[in-house]
Image (spheres, helix red, strand yellow):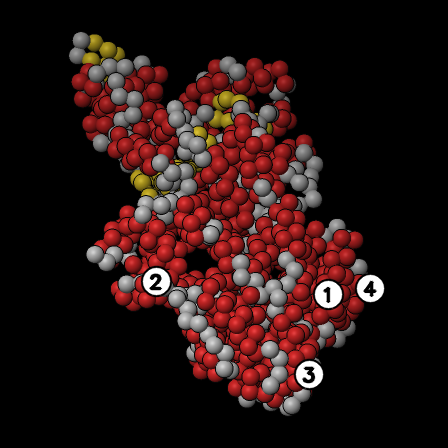
Amino acid sequence: MPTFCGRTSLLSQIGDALSRTRRGEGGSLFLRGESGAGRSRLLAEVGRLARTDMVVLRGRASGITPTTPFRPLAEALLQFTRSAGAHAADALGPYRLVLGRLIPEWRDPAVGPEEQSLIVLAEGVLRLLALAGRDRGCLLLLDDLHDADAETLTIVDYLADNLADQPVTMVAALLDQEGTALDVARSAAQRGAADLLLLPRLSRDELRELIATRLDCAAARVGDDLFELVWQPSAGNPALAGELLDGLVDAGHLVTGPDGWQLAGRPQAGIPGSLSRRLARRLEDSPPELRRLLPAAAVFGERFPLAALPAMTGLGEHDLTSQLHHGLAAELIQPVADTPGWYAFRHPVTAEALLESRPAGHTADLARQAAETVEKLHPGLPGTLCQLAARLRRQAGDHDAAGRHLIEAASRALADGAAASAVDLLDQATGMTTDPALRADAGERLVQALVEAGRIDRALQMMPELDGLGGGLSRQRLAVLHTRLAWAAVFAARTADGLAQVAEARRQLGAGATPADLAAVDVVAAHLIIELPGPEQVGKAEELARQAAAVAERHDLPVVACQAWQLLGMLVRQRNTDEATACLEHSRELAVRHGLRLWEVHALVRLGNDDAARDGSLRRLRQVRRDAWSIGAVTAAHQAEASIALQVALQGGYIEAEEIVAQTLPATTRLEMVETAGHLWQTSAVVAAHQGQRREMESRLAELRRYRPDAPVDAKVYGLARVFCSLLEEDRPRAAEEMAAALRADGGNPALSPINGRAGLDLLLRAVTGDLDDPAALDDGSDGVRRLRWNRQFAEMARAVLVGRRGDPAGAAAAADEAIRAAEPYPLARHLILRLASEAALTDGWGDPVGWLRRAEEHFHESEHAAVARACRALLRQAGVTVGQRRDGVGNIPAALRARGVTVREYEVLDLIAARLGNQEIASRLHLSPRTVEKHVARLMAKTDRPDRAALRDLARTLRPG
């Protein structure tokens, strides 16, 4: 007999997806269907089939209340972590702490939800699922997704976008009705991230098979009269058809005979199609205790707390237990396995049907009695009981009491990091309350929740309404809201909106504002002002930040103080690097003193950047990256990684920089860390530029533009990437144009991009061309930025050129020595400044231009920067030095490959590929790392349009002479 009627095609489609998952190709399927279509049963069958050789994790959104944050995901993931234990925790690294919101034993009380964005949590879920499926593949089953909280749906949406490259398939079932869950499923399907499948009603033939299966007979033995009686009311809905069959059996209307199952008597169509009428009739025939018990339980909904029923029914514990486990109650009700003290109706519509059978007005009275009982039994309404009491109060018609409960439930959700759930709850509260004070309270909290949920536009739209509530909110409370919105604008890079909120906050505080009230406004205003173009903004921002820092420390406002001191560390660097470091150290000390772990890590990241900028040291950055991972501060860790990648690239560690970008960019992109991901794209362009790979540089910058199409071009794109690529091509005019673009990009504000060239490379380029001729111009008050080690190498060599031109060879040589010492960590920059300064040194008679040119020529020849190497040899010949001809191998490269930009080293790799050597062997032969060989192979395939090594071998053989 068939056990699944009408679902063979769907099972086959899901089976194909599971086959791909076993090969490491994941995906997502959303299964929608009406109530009674068999969604849960189909998920169970899929799980049964997959369990033989896959890890199967299952969670259900329906709980005691529909907005329990993360319930289905926590339920599913716990099934894996219970068995994987310490192995899973160790493998996840920092994401173990992040997942503490879902896995209780991984929770660290010291790490609050404010330290973990929802997207970071989603990334943690993705990594845990990938770990679960690493060996055999993983199937994640999520049931009743239409009842899921907003946070769960956000994570589900994230998973849909990112499972394709993981050994995980997600199958989520939801009701086919308009709502957020169906919107998520449709959106994922429209962008090609998931399949949206419909669980249709059964056809006539399929329904006949279902009836036959339920009656344990062949389909041919289902009489036509019986079939039509079930078909007409059910229209192919499996659950309703089952109810109809059960009703016919209960009423004695089905008999079996030689011609199969037939109807006995003449039951009317639909008997007993109305579940509520059938239940009402059975309830009327039940004892009075049961007639009190079942409606009292039903008013709670699908699930109910046993402890509330004695007070509502007058039944003692013994009588209550006896009624629940016998007769009609035992048929309709069962204990909730994972929630002690709670019971549930076996069928979701039973509770509604029981209430429909009661007289008008009786349900409201029951709901009021239930709310009062729950409030008395559970003072403070812990957990989700607050939402339950709100629903009961609303059902009873007491909307203000319901609103109070919803506001409290939203506050708890916000404290737990479930901002989207808080928004939903507060929307309900504002829509039902009539009390002005309650509406003001709900509106204030709603703005806070919208900001936390990232819905800034709606929060901004709400503020005029709140400002106009008169006595509903105090001016101080309104100012706090405007300040909070200003911070949201900072993080969203919406400077104009943020400054408008700052102005409104000041207006609300008025002339009588206390210094403590203004400190929080001043520090956010400083963060916004620094984003405006113009050198004068630094002074304005510093004044506000100093004022905020002083007030915050006097009035015990540690977070405001940390914010102010960290900003000051960036602002004062322009003139004094020691003072900048002192500001950051003070911020760190404050954070430690007040137990602000996240602010401590952010201070350490800034101090690490400070070390790298001052002397090229990466020790502290690498340490803070480890510290951030150890406490689950994922955002700070990725910011540290982005900084390390750029500094490593500047120091010539192109392989390590590429590896950091490759490892970090996908995660930061998924996590929507837009600024950090943008920095990583820029670093990847810098890596290409510093190797003279213009085509690759432009390709990466094009990717950056696609990623952030509306963002202005960062000054680093010109000052650290394009200018260097042009210098390696010996194209001075183009380098000058691109440097001018870098200076335009920072708007004259050096705090925005201190190493873009304004205080460094631009000075040297202008000095060697004669556009800068006065050494005094090097001391213009920007000493702090100029003393950063990256800038110092260029600035000091510029000083050497200018001083030498004025006839002071000793002074020029001393400045050049200082430049070369500063350039020691930066091999490319060091040899470029030697090449750039040598012309002036030869002309004006200072320094060691011949020695510099020899060193530069050797470096550029070895690194295959042929244009600069040729220029160095030409200058040596002009100086009267005999220079041997470099046999660089370029002439050995076939013309077809030279036209495609294949380098000497790449051609050497190609030649060894043709000899069937692997990467390890090629690396050993050429004294390279295997990773470098891998990069050369990838570039060869890209430049020659060949898909694999075999095609490269064929190409090499066709190009060999003879």
Residue that numbered label 3 is attached to = 810
Q: Residues within 10 Å of mark 4 (few under 14, many from 20)?
A: few
Residue type, label 2: Val
The residue pinned by badge 2 equals: 902
Secondary structure state at the residue bearing disc 3: helix
Secondary structure of the residue carrying tag 4 is: helix
Task: Give the CA separation, mark 4 to mark 3.
Answer: 53 Å
Residue 311, quarter of the rendered image: top right
Taking the view exactly as shown, the residue that stands out farthest to the top is 258
The residue depicted at 48 percent of the width and 83 percent of the height is 878
Amino acid type assigned to the residue bearing label 3 in the image: Ala
Left or right, 252 with reference to 279: left
Q: Earlier in the sequence, mark 2 or mark 3?
A: 3
Q: Amino acid at mark 4?
A: Arg
Question: Which residue is at 58% across, 50% downward?
Answer: 634
The label shown at residue 554 is 4
The residue beneath circle 1 is: 581
- 745 left or right of 466 in image: left
